[in-house]
Amino acid sequence: MTAIVLIAVLGVTGLLCWPAERLGPRWPGWLAILGLLIDLAIVLGLWSQASASGPWLDAVRYAWIPQLGISLHFGIDGLSLLLVGLACVVGLVAIAAAWRERRQRDGLYYLLLLWSLAGITGVFVALDLVLFYFFWEIMLVPTYLLFLWGRDRQLRAAVTFFLYTQLSGLLMLVAILGLYVVHGQATGTYTFDFVDLTATRVDGPVTTWLLLGFWVAFAVKLPILPFHTWLPDAYSRAPTGVTIVLAGIMAKTAGYGLLRFAIPLFPEAAAGLAPAIMAFAAVSILYASWTAFGQRNFKRLVAYSSITSMGFVMLGAFASNDLAWQGATLQMLAHGLSIAALFLLAGALQERLGGTEFERMGGLWAITPRLGAFALVFALATLGLPGLGNFVGEFLVLAGAFQVSWFLTALAAPGLVLTTVYALWLIQRVFQGESIGGQRLPDATGRETLALGLLLAGLLWLGLFPQQTLDLVAPSLSALRPQVATTQQPGNDVVGVFVGDGELLVGTGVSPQGLRAPWDLGLPRAVPLDAPPTGTSAAISLVFPIEHYQPSRADVQGGGR
Amino acid sequence: MSGADLLAILPLLVLGGAAVVLMLAVALRRSLQLTLLLTLLALAAALACLAPAVGVAPRRVTGLLFVNGFGLLYVGLLISTSLAGALLAYGYAGKRGGQPEEAYILLLLATLGGSVLALSDHFASFFLGLELLSVSLYGLISYSRWRPPSLEAGAKYLVLAAVSSAFLLFGMALVYAELGTMSFAEIVPLAGQAGTIGILLPGLLLIVVGIAFKLAVVPFHMWTPDVYEGAPAPVTAFIATVSKGAVFALLLRLFGQIDLARYPALVFAFALIAVASMLGGNLLALLQYNVKRLLAYSSISHLGYVLVAFLAGGALGIPAATFYLVAYFATILVAFGAVGSLSDPARLRDADSLADYRGLFWRQPWLTVAFAASLLSLAGIPLTAGFFGKLYVSLAGISSPLWWLVVVLVVSSTIGLYYYLRVASIMFRRPTGRELTPAISWADGVVLAGLTGAIFFLGVYPSPLITLIQAALGLG
């Protein structure tokens, strides 16, 4: 139930914000803060209850459209919980960033902001593919309308953003429907339920296409290389609060979708495409960090830095091992905090200088030392200074990816060097060098200091005590990732086991990543646990027992079959 | 004719009788309120008569009509739509004097014609229903006779509808020449037998052309924007819903039963029409700054989506198409209801320019919510009925051999999104202060509130409607 409460709180407070503007100009804002704080409290409450009993902290399932196999299936595990928490924090920062912007129709602004966050929360807790898609789309419309408060009269950036995400989202919908049909034809159960779909996975070449359908949606939202063109305009033209939501949390829905849905649903296709996609990610990291140099605008530079960081998420997700996945999760959390801070700073500068072009800036440290100090710290976070969260994320991703492909890891790593250079260059351009003149600008206000301080505390905590976060997400991640145990078979073949819910799959191939499916060997596709396969003793006897799974299964695997 | 036969067609009898009563009533005492009341009573009575009709269904009545769950579902849908249309017409015409009462007689007759189409099982009843519908529409479209575009639209519709009827009749003649029967019940099995293709195929194709004219799908869509623009907004809503819904019901009755796989040419024709409508409608709508014309092109593409479900057919496709139509009806009624409630019939044109909608939110927040909901529903955004409609149609499409049509659907609906968003976002912009601020009548308010509620309800919980449709189609 908690999952539904989380969404409902945001939805209802959002609705209340609209009439609340009649009570006074500040009412909608405070109401929105209240709603986000309630959600944050629920998240923290759930966290304190997290135990080792299993990944799920909360799950409910109601019939929704039983005729089509669609259910209201919500679940919160460690991964969802952390990202919902991040959504609340980012939402609060977004409100703080825009607090002083003078605007009419405050109520509608906060209504749309909260609804967009409610949609994002829904994405993080939905366990039915249609439900997931439902929220995936819901978060877009309010975000689009929020662009009306920006400086872009023609809404060009908003329209580009919307059409990109909508088209890619619809391709994902086609993939979802395709999976439904293929899975139904193979197993006889027509369902959109994530748990049922992963329990009996489908196979064959069609899964590659289905995976690509999902991947395109996530690659656009994240974004990575060929799909990123909407981003610099959208991030720099949207009002500051909206940019913070877009970069801080909405991009994370894509990373989440990869870890939760795309790869667990199609592990073999993902393994097959992994080299290509990781190469995309590596090139994307390099390209974005290189392009960042060409920017003459604070916001656009930060926007490109966001592409770099998100490239690591894609890299880690497709490296598909524990280290990389944990790294990708940490990277999402840390980047959410650091990018929110950077865009908050950009907004603060825009408020003071009237724009974020570098020509307006220079030597600001002397005028606004507190803003400068914060900017320096968050720039250091972006470049991956140890002690701050981003370092842990990037390090784990690279360590995990290295196990899969040293070459691609080596290709992506220079991106970090470039990031270091442009992050420091940014500080130099804005806060050092020749001063823009004897302007007297207000330094960070109490509100800004509070928001930035909280974000910094979060980054420090992620950087210094990552284990606490990892403990929370590790069970969720290892439950999601298909477990592959390997051993050498005579003749250099590798035998592996996929374990889903209630079935055992046996496969062979050249490497854990390129695992060949059992049906290629003439083995049964899915082996029920109580009926051992026949005629396959040679292959099966070499299967390793697998951790994370119940003893009964280990018995089966250890039984010499 | 037995009592059960009469019971089965009671809704039709009520509608026909009511038209006569209304004509007499208008002759005796001209009062818009009284006319509206009688119309609403008649439509409500016809709706109530569906219950006994369901009791005796399925039943073949006089060889012309076949009353079954499917037909009655569509009759119910058409009558409910007319109910909303009658209220919208009151809200529209009530703002001005003149003599709007006779429009209600035409409305009842058109509904009767549509209902006959939905129940027809014979070329004779098919043609009778279609002409009853069309002739009533000629009058309705040019009802605002002080507006030149309205007259022009009526004339255009008259000519093109007559041409399409000619195609239809010729097609029927060819089919009759080949099979020697005009009853669907006999055509369907005969068309399924081997060796009967001959001139049957050209006959069927000509019937498709006639139907496609009425559905306004590419390349038979030319009349749509002009008629949509010229007709008074409530009439446009009526054309977009009742006229198309009735013809689509007939399409399902005739072609839904024939094994299309035996006629690749027919499948090809339908697929071509579907693709051309989806892409053509959406692309042409991009060029429009007139809201009514924009909705006309959008309706072309929406019928293309429905054809995707129709082509999928079977236990998934026909409920999907029906669900889509219901969602679309509610949505388009809200859209044209909003246009109508902003329009002044005394002016030369309805409020159909994009500029009329600028900053509407700050003057009419609730009306804007309704209109925005309908636009988002047309775009297929979640929380609105259109989302599940599109999901259902795509699901049906993707499980059929013509799955690639769904890819076209996806691409074209992304194009569509662009212009829906343009209209939606203009309503939230800062007003310029030169806009219309009409008072909205209670009748418009009731319809808009009720149907917007329905759009959201279907967008959140579509399950009951799906159950109803499946039950009516006998799919359980």
Image: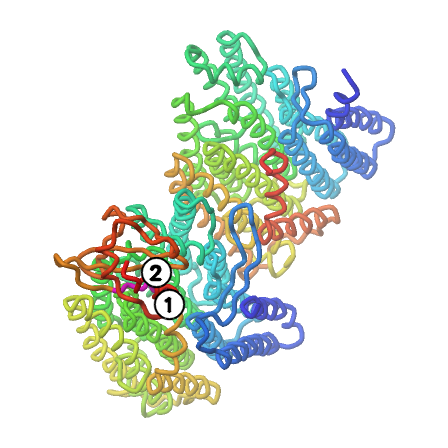
Instruction: Please say which color scheme the image uses.
Output: rainbow
Looking at the image, which is closer to me, A376 or A269? A269
Label 1 – label 2 distance at C-alpha? 9 Å
Tell me where residue A168 appears, x and y as whole percent: 37, 53
Query: Residues in magenta?
Result: A480-485
Residue that appears at 51% across and 42% down: B294
Asked whether disc 1 touches disc 2, contact meaning CB atoms under 8 Å apart, the reply is yes
For disc 1, the marked residue is A549
Residue at (39, 35) in percent of width and height = B402
Quadrant housing residue B3: top right
Label 2 secondary element: strand
Q: Chain of mark 1?
A: A
**Quadrant location, the C terminus of chain B:** top right
- The residue that label 2 is drawn on is A499
Q: Main secondary structure of the magenta part?
A: loop
First-in-chain label (1 vs 2): 2
| Residue A243 in magenta stretch | no
